[in-house]
Image (cartoon, grey):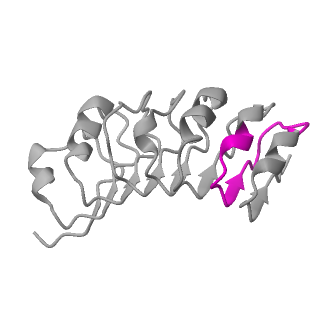
Amino acid sequence: SSLEKLNLEGNKFVTLPESFTSLKNLKSLNVSQNAVINEEMLFAVLAKMQNLKTLKADYCQIRSVPNTTIYLQDVSLKGNLIKTLPLNILYAKSIDLSSNTLLDLEAIFTNLSSSKSLKTLNLGYCKIAVLPISIGALKSLESLSLIGNNLTILPAEIGNLSNLKFLDLSNED
């Protein structure tokens, strides 16, 4: 099949058919707002889709990302129930975790610190009051969004982000 982009947003998929792994040209998949999706099954299928570059799985009630190697470049997991990310997400250039209010930032920053490819990280509206000093380990980061959080101070280690070109701390409140 020559299908490159597939949008399944707003349905009630529990899992993706195994036959999706034969979609060799598929580069972008949107499964957002499929609230009953089984994350283990979803990521098992995604691990076999080696040409897939973009995943949008926003508002799917995903609790965890299994430790399966996936080669995604752009990952959007907005509005889920995620606490941490496994090391397998190291290939991503862009990660959107906005509106995930249960994040363990220390664990996430520690896991992402060995990534050489991560350029963009969105942690907007995550109810963050304090950024851990481990933020300074995300050396490849060029864009960091912390919009709509409850920050009162920034750790000095944010100065270690020598490649940072864009930092958004705005808050409408």
- Which sits in the foreground, 52 or 133? 133
Q: Is residue 55 left or right of residue 162?
A: left
Q: Does the magenta stretch include residue 122?
A: no
Can you give x and y, in whole percent of width and height, for residue 1 in the image?
Answer: 9, 69
Picture residue at 24% right of the left edge, 55% below the top? 50
Is residue 102 visible in this depiction of the protein? Answer: no
Is residue 28 visible in this depiction of the protein? Answer: yes
Q: Does the magenta stretch include residue 149?
A: yes
Does 74 appear above or below 97? below
Does 85 appear above or below 91? above
Can you give x and y, in whole percent of width and height, for residue 128 in the image?
Answer: 75, 34
- Which sits in the foreground, 118 or 32? 118
- Which sits in the foreground, 139 or 25? 139
Region rendered in magenta: 135-155
Picture residue at 23% right of the left edge, 33% below the top? 41
Picture residue at 48% right of the left edge, 44% below the top? 77
Please, which residue is most extreme toward the bottom here? Answer: 2
Q: Is residue 23 left or right of residue 10?
A: left
Q: In which quarter of the image is the C terminus?
A: top right
Q: In this view, does 69 lie to the left or right of 103?
A: left
Residue 108 quadrant: top right
Can you give x and y, in whole percent of width and height, for residue 88 in the image?
Answer: 40, 39
The mark total stands at 0
The kind of secondary structure the magenta stretch mainly shows is: loop
Residue 64 quadrant: top left
Can you give x and y, in whole percent of width and height, for residue 171 in the image?
Answer: 83, 49
